[in-house]
Image (cartoon, helix red, strand yellow):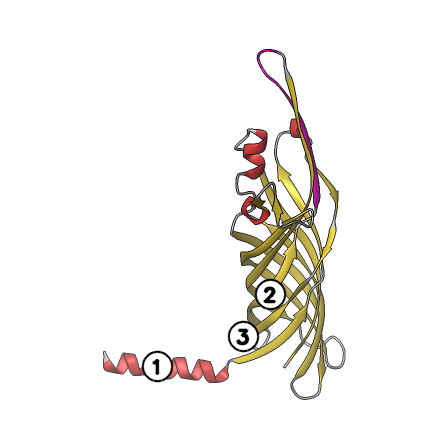
Amino acid sequence: MKKLTLLLLFLGFGYGASAQIEIGLMVSPTISSNRFIAEDKYNFERESNKLRLGVGVIADYFFAQNYAFSTGLVYRSKGSEISYNYTRIDNGGTSTTIAGQDDIAIQYIELPLTLKLFTNEIAPATILYFQVGGSLNTKVAAKVNDKKVIDSEKTAKRFNVFEADVMLGGGTEFQFGESTKLFAGLTYHRGLSDIDNKYYSEKLGDKNISLKNNGVSIDVGVKF
């Protein structure tokens, strides 16, 4: 048993010594939108996409020459301008119209959990990378129509605290000097979880309504 433990420790230390970690800073402006799961009668529409900002720290942990586990902490704003319009008719024939137009802006701290695949050099000091995985996100703030409070209620309460999404992307890295790398790429973020904390479902009287984030980011940064 002792020999097995020593062997595992030796292999662990050897693997840690051979692995390489690259830490970097990233700026990630995002074209953000929302998508809906709801019946047509509610007339949900995306009025416009919004340009939101993301900034953060990333870390690429190489477990082989061309493969890395990529993570980090990223502050990112999401959301777009949406509208809905629903006319409800009760048993007495009285109609009630429920309508609104909301400019949603939700700020998250993201924890990416992705795999990066790197090519060999396609040109001097230039390689391509492809990224796939997801992220676990925690809401830190939110505004609706640029307001934190509407009708004596904090607008942040309209949205769930946690969100999960899938990430697919790719880009190019450029080597400058011995350890400095510049990178630029595109990433598609597709929300997997409902961000509506029962606000729209209760307002329209349908528990099957859900709202999810979508976005495409331009990722630019430097690694050391």
Residue closest to the far top: 92
Along the horizontal axis of the image, is 96 left or right of 137? Answer: right
* Residue underneath mark 3: 61
Q: Is residue 83 magenta?
A: yes
Label 3: few (<14), some or many (≥20) within 10 Å? some
Q: Overall secondary structure of the magenta stretch?
A: strand
* Residue underneath mark 1: 9
Q: Nearer the viewer, mark 3 or mark 1?
A: 3
Q: Nearer the viewer, mark 1 or mark 2?
A: 2
Write the residue at 56% across / 63% down: 114
Name the secondary structure under disc 3: strand
Residue closest to the far front: 152
* Residue underneath mark 2: 74
Residue closest to the far bottom: 178
Q: CA distance from mark 1 to mark 2?
A: 33 Å
Amino acid at dot 3? Tyr
Q: Earlier in the sequence, mark 2 or mark 3?
A: 3
Residue 180, x across and y down, in percent:
67, 83
Amino acid at dot 2? Val
Q: Is residue 207 above or below residue 63?
A: above
Q: Is residue 106 above or below residue 92?
A: below
Query: In front here: 173 or 121?
Result: 173
**Quarter occupied by the C terminus:** bottom right
Q: Is residue 193 visible?
A: no
Looking at the rendering, the stretch of residues picked out in magenta corresponds to 81-92
Write the residue at 57% across / 49% down: 156
Query: In front here: 122 or 151?
Result: 151
